[in-house]
Amino acid sequence: MRETNFIIENNARHLWHPMAHPAEMQAQPPRIINSGEGVEIVDIQGKKVLDAVGGLWNVNLGYSCEPVKKAIRDQLDELPYYSTFRGTTNSPLIELSYELAEWFRPDGLSRSFFTSGGSDSVETCLRLARQYHKITGQPERTKFVALKKGYHGTHFGGASVNGNQNFRRNYEPLLPGVIHLPAPFSYHNPFDTTDGAEIAAAIGRLFEDEIAFQGADTIAALIVEPVLGAGGVIVPHETFLPLMREICDRHGILLIADEVITAFGRTGAWTGSRLWGVKPDLMSTAKAITNGYFPFGAVMISDKVAEVFEGSKNGLGSIGHGYTYSGHPAGAAAALATLKETRRLNVAANAAVRGEELLQGLRALQNKHELIGDVRGKGLMCALELASDREKKIAAGKDVLQTVQDVAYEAGVLVRTSGPNIIMSPPLVITAKDVGRILDALDSGLAAAGKLLHSR
């Protein structure tokens, strides 16, 4: 590694960052993170902060999980890579497929297709959904239904079903035949109500109306996050996902659960689908499956879908899809070790308890700071929506959000900004003391941002 001065001087000069304007990154270079330990990260200046972002929703076990690191090291010595395209596979991947079938048995999912990450997993779900209907003799079922505010990655398929223009506008035209329903969002919605059950029922009626208009025999699948993550941590009413499942079943539409964020305990349940008592037909996973230590993902497939593919007697059942790194042996070894530690530590239970503590603390901050328009969360997925005018729900400006982030960082905690939202997704192994640190840092950031807003 070159000396520190070289790294700082060349920050963002030759590198384009995801989800950022290249010119802005050059004008305001990003923080350089050099190391991590436990639930903390250390920047190039030596400042240590609690990582309330959890990497990017994915470092559930923190940065010092030695069993996962050792599994990767050992596998690199044994077999650093081999293809899983037809004719070859590897031992850790076979073991992982068995363990995942056991893990997701309560969700009715028994088969795996392996990918390099979340966007790959979503793309795979969309493709398999269309293929499923071709095998069953319904080739016109090609359309997808998704939610506004939903996030499903950045491949063309995922971007097409995304419900946020930030990930769509500059890349249009996208995939045709995608229908978007309103998000189950009590703070912002077109239904003039804050009642979650009423919102869920209204979206269900719109879904039924779209099915009648489009024709059920043209719709392949509904894709939905059990808790909407990047769109602002939108927690639906408990009736929402069961209602969507029932409508899908009645009309022969597959349900894809995008659990890239919510699988493996983040909501306080082992999966977001299980949280709401729903069994999806396909599930996209990634992120926490290897604790973020190796790029890896898995699509989980229900018995119903598997039986159709495996019972196919012609070429329609052949999977003409895959990635060079599908089922990478080091990734499979990392996932095996991660699952074992995730289960041993029972991080879902900790996420439920710590998440409730964090949510209650955020509500106390809302009572203290006029700047907070809304507080949302489930497990260790939490968000503050900041408003320059709380009564009118006018979003706070980017400089206000940046002030909260900067001051909180100086106070020893890294949080994430997204639009008008401050998002928290810390490792699932945080303690009550860590929750207190997050709340104290946010308190300082909000106080500074409030002064900025009132000085205008």
Image (cartoon, helix red, strand yellow):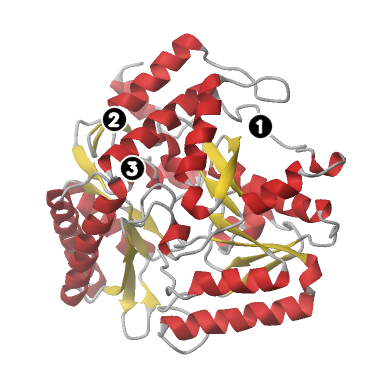
Check disc 1: other Cα within 10 Å, few if <14, some if 14-19, many if 20+. some
Residue at left 19%, top 36%? 47
Q: Hey, what amino acid is under mark 3?
A: Asn
**41 relative to 411, above or below:** above
Q: Residue 65: which numbered mark, if any?
A: 2
Query: Is there any visible trace of residue 61 in the rendered image?
Result: no
244 or 277, which is in the foreground? 277
Residue at left 20%, top 31%? 46
State which tag comes first along the sequence, 3 or 1: 3
Q: Hey, what amino acid is under mark 2?
A: Cys
Q: Do the residues labelled 1 and 2 touch (CB within 8 Å)?
A: no
Please give left or right for residue 138 compared with residue 9 in the image. Answer: right
**97 relative to 157, above or below:** above
**What is the secondary structure assignment of the residue under circle 3?**
loop
Image location of residue 280, percent across then percent down: 57, 58
Query: Is there any visible trace of residue 321 in the rendered image?
Result: yes
**227 relative to 395, above or below:** above
The residue identified by callout 3 is 60
**What is the secondary structure assignment of the residue under circle 1?**
loop
